[in-house]
Image (cartoon, helix red, strand yellow):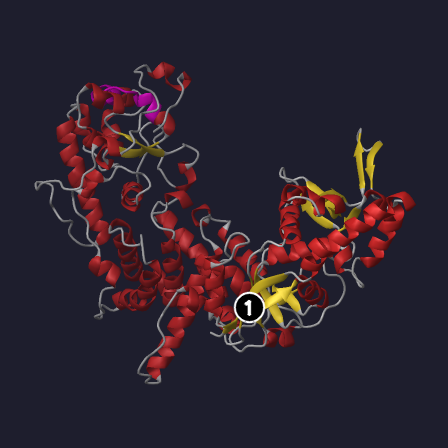
Amino acid sequence: MSFETPHYSIGDLLSWAASGHLQLPDFQRDYKWDDERIRSLLVTIVRGHPMGVVMVLETGGKNVRFKPRPVTGVQGAVQEPSLLLLDGQQRTTSLFQALSDDGIVDTEDDRRKKLRRKYYLDIEQAVGTSQDQDAAVRSLPHDGLVTENFGRDVVFDVSTTEKEQQLGLMPMTAPFAPGGAMTWLLGYLAAGGPDDTPRRQLLMQQLNQQVLLPLTSYRIPAIKLGQDTSKDAVATVFEKVNTGGLPLNVFELLTATFAGDRAYFEAHGTDFRLGEDWEATTAVRDKHQVLAGLQATDFLQGVSILATLEQRRQDIADGKSKPTATSARKEDILALDLDRYLDWSDRLRKALPWVAHFLKGEHFHTAGGLAYRSQLVSLAVVRVLVGDDIDLYAVRNRIRQWFWCGVLGELYGSTIETKIARDAEQVPAWALAAKDGSAAPQPDTVARASFAETRLLSMRTRGSAAYKGVYALLMAQQAPCVDWKFHKVIDQATYEDMQVDIHHVFPHKWCIDNGIDPSYRESIINKTPLAKKTNIQLGGVSPKQYMARLDSNGIAPEAVDDIIRSHAIDPATLRAGDFDAYFEARRNALVGLIEGAMGKPVNRDWDEDLPGTEAPEAFAEEADDVEGDDPGDADAAGPGAS
């Protein structure tokens, strides 16, 4: 990557912006500087202080072709740009609008109220002290009228050139107008009459020497990137040196790249709009609550995986010694050409309803309940690669095993680009081999996944992947998980209606009253999914007492016991109020569920020392909704955190 470090005058930047010689890449965010920030920038250049570096990119290179757009405020047709402004948009746009044409800027105040302002230079203050110069730049309404009483009373008026000259307020556009500020200043000299001419003449001389000459020769340092600059280098610019706001993400960069695709324009007569294509994806996503967290960059990762995997397979077939890597890295996403994107994006989009159906079947009902958002990408990619065979019993079982190994093995917390690339390479062939029982190596996710029994004790944070996984696994048992009060299966249809959440089995208050170790009390072993009103009815009493309440809900005790068993709980331990017996039985039951989901044994380390378990103060306690023991008053009591 080559670059130069020229210095540009303000006049250069203004004329280049007006002609279109200098434009913005289309991915740049809209102009948005407030009034005071613009005024402060103008004070900076009036004082001759440095305003910071701008960065531009030469157009015409083979590596990068971004669709350009004019600087905000440029009117009329413009030429093809020779330079694209990568860093310094807000400053350059502010200068262009405030110093060009009529100098009117659409901005806002510090309360985000919309304003139209014009900026003036107070001549007397401009040649005064440093403190005077700070106040020399005046921001006034665009029509030059300062009013009170809801606009009825004019208290200050520079609405005409003559009034500007009389008051000594020169528009900031004057020094950069054709011919410079002299025409305006000659009017200023005469505006005071013969008696004031000597004073004004002295002020004019001071203004020219101290302000106008330095202002019109003010030079702005720049970094000019050459035509050989790559797209990933441009992305790095926005991550590392963009000073105008939030760095742009890969979606915004690719939006501009695709919009500038010449072949697409020639074939269709219009630019390709990645944003509109993403809207088609969000229309699918928004039909399924569990997919709500899917972001545009996630979708691009999936497309990149599919496109690079296709190229890798072709490279291997062609005998290349170094085939393309399957990748979802930023640089590879930025390297996507539009044809490959179009080839894979629709197929990936059509896979999303299947992903939602699969996740609902595993009892992940909301986006917040997902263990890992990145698994959305892997599931969609695998669905595309496996095709309709994914719903064959043997194939789906392997997909399910791979998925649960990722969740319970907690494998998607970091370096996800590498993991989802390996999933695409390894999972489809392994899953499809189940159709005829042929040999296929296990995916890394399945082979490497492990679960230690003691993790059940340290699993107390509802944000952790394994916690969410066990919670869903309890509801995803082969025998449906049934709510204890309403006797309804907990599924997608009832989950929200019953306000299902995970609650204590031996209530929080009872555990405290009976000296139960906090690590046992708050462990997921002592939690189960229940409707909010069910939890309220249980109250803060021993299970021995609340089981009697459940028996009185209109079904026989034997039926109540069957419902309790649907939560992987031995009802006899609850009827006895025996926490220790309950805890051991539930631990073993959860281990069995986990082993069934992962398709491999759990590491039985419970009887060993328990390293790494958190101290009681390291986790947030979760109280039950109510701690009373009167079911008749339960609904009237205020619910608490659970």
Q: Which residue sits furthest bottom?
A: 319
Q: Main secondary structure of the magenta part?
A: helix
Magenta stretch in the rendered image: 535-548
Q: Residue at x 37, y 43 (%)?
A: 369
Find residue 20 and report its image quarter.
Answer: bottom right
487 versus 480 height, above or below: above
Q: Is residue 545 magenta?
A: yes
- Mark 1 = which residue? 257
Q: Residue at x 65, y 48 (%)?
A: 43
Q: Is residue 166 visible?
A: yes
264 versus 144 height, above or below: below
Within 10 Å of disc 1 (Cα), the crowding (few <14, some 14-19, many 20+) is many
Residue 226 rendering spot, x and y as whole percentages = 53, 74
Q: Is residue 578 magenta?
A: no
Residue 283 rendering spot, x and y as whole percentages = 54, 53
Q: Is residue 70 visible?
A: no
* Residue type of the residue flagged with mark 1: Thr
